[in-house]
Image (tube, rainbow, N blue to C red):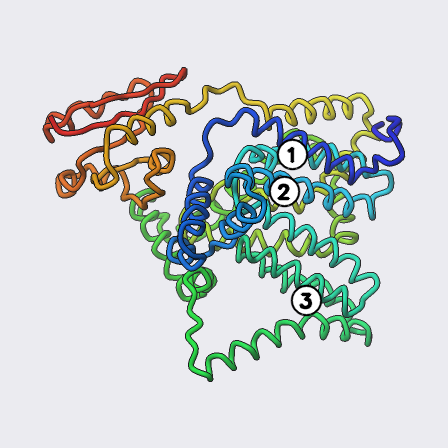
Amino acid sequence: MLNTVKLPKWLSPPRMAFLASLLLSLIAVAGTVTVGKDAARYLYISQEVIRQTPAVAFELFTWPWFSLLLAITHHVSGVSLELAAYLWCAFLMAGTCALLVSITQRYVTDGGYWACLVVLSIPAFNHLRNDIIREFGFWFFCALALWLMLSWLERGGWLRATLVQLAVAMAALFRIEAVFLFPVLALSVLGDLNTRQGWLKLFQITLFLLAVIMTVLFLLISGYTLSQPRVDYVASLIDPRIFLERFNLMTGKFAEVALEKYSKDDAREIVFFGLLLTLITKFIGLCGPLTLPFLYRPTWRAVTDYWRQFRPLAWAWLLYFCMLLIFFVQERFINSRYVSFLNLLAVPVLTMALISFAKIFPRLGKVVIILALLVMLHNVVSFNPKKTHYLEAAAWLSQNTSAADAIFYEDSRLAYYAGRGYPSMPTRAEAMSPEHARDFRYFVLTVKPGDTSLQSWMTAQHKQVLSQFENRKGERVVVIGDW
């Protein structure tokens, strides 16, 4: 169906995915007025690196490599930090799409253009194109590592093994969780350990880790302190003792609040399978209409083919799913941005299922294609009111308050746009409590339409609305101060 479309010979599926991805990112960013919360933090850190020294980045954030990249780009090219960030994110995303298409068409006959449709329309990561996040670098280098890994598994070689591990290391500079791909490397060669070549491959991928371990031991013996907050945090997440302690605490509270005494013994099973189902549901939801082919049972064969032909991606999917489940228990929340990497790894299986479905049901296949194209546009075109009131409120704050004033920002982006950095703030409830309300001279709060809960608090604290700003949706930013 898609293969009958006549396209120039130079426009191979990976190139098409790369160029189309850049176009989609341009459309998404063109409608953006304010950056996201994480983006404001990264940009602020970059600003401080430029004003001071790179060392300040590690004082402001535990894993600031993306911010350092932006600062270096600004220093070398002279482009603004925000433009540099959008360019990096757009090109990394385009590279990720091209690599996923290249990986898919490698083993799926005539699957290149189908993979383009899948990778450019799947909501999981395409709806994030207008944001500035570290995930773009994490996704690109993980996809590059998996692309290299497939080549290394076929042909072997020290150079390919080294390049795979370097790609994983680069991905870890964006998000340290990328180190989970090292076990994926080992698991991918387990089936070949009955041969000499298999043992050679295992040695090739463990030599790098052995070198790292030996270096760490040498530094420890020499008296160096290697503690790093982000590394320590990740280590605490996978510590079985801490995991079981928090899981038991979660199940205990759930049993106490939600279950009758006759069901309290089943709390662990209820919580575990509830979290499991939540993750699976999020994964399915983020696939959008591309899950429809799986309603037809014969397309389930794609899962078997995925495991056989794309084993490194399948192992990565399973390990990352387990990581998300551990994180869910430890931190008690999960979001679509974290889950989206599962959908990225599933691009080949979604492509195979879609091709199989379209061959069996050509008309319904066209319906799925149209739905995918509509979702592709929906991912990058938004008609929701912009947060222009954030910019207006920030301008008022910069003109009517001083940097020395104690100000509570419910959303630290308001401080960023007011030129006051990106301060770490307590929760709204903590800041407005009787114990802490007098710690702040001004309160800058975001208020939803119809919310009148602030009036009683302002009366009790002898405060008033100094100014407020509203967008077309009725969302407000309210600046509150003393009478």
Residue 277 visible, this angle = no
Name the residue beneath numbered marker 2: 343
3D distance between C-alphas at marks 1 and 2: 8 Å
3D distance between C-alphas at marks 1 and 3: 30 Å
Query: Who's the residue at 72% across and 44% down the image?
Result: 100
Extreme-top residue of the structure: 472
Q: Residue 122 bears which disc, if any?
A: 1
> Left or right: where does residue 218 sit relative to residue 210?
left
Q: Residue 186 bears which disc, if any?
A: 3
Q: Secondary structure at mark 3?
A: helix
Instruction: Name which of mark 1 and mark 3 comes first in the sequence.
Output: 1
The residue nearer to you, when weighing 386 against 181, is: 386
Q: Quadrant of the N terminus?
A: top right
Residue type of the residue flagged with mark 1: Ile
Name above or below for residue 339 compared with residue 145.
Answer: above
3D distance between C-alphas at marks 3 and 2: 22 Å
The residue nearer to you, when weighing 164 against 482, is: 482
Query: Who's the residue at 68% across and 50% down the image?
Result: 143
How far across and down, in percent of the image, does residue 234 sit?
Answer: 46, 60
Quarter location, residue 88:
top right
Evaluate if marks 3 and 2 touch, with contact meaning CB atoms under 8 Å apart.
no
Name above or below for residue 59 compared with residue 445.
Answer: below
Q: Secondary structure at mark 2?
A: helix
Query: Who's the residue at 32% across and 46% down the image?
Result: 424
Quarter location, residue 29:
top right
Q: How many marks?
A: 3
Query: Label 2: few (<14), some or many (≥20) within 10 Å?
Result: many
How far across and down, in percent of the image, does residue 134 sit?
Answer: 53, 47
> Left or right: where does residue 186 sit relative to residue 280?
right
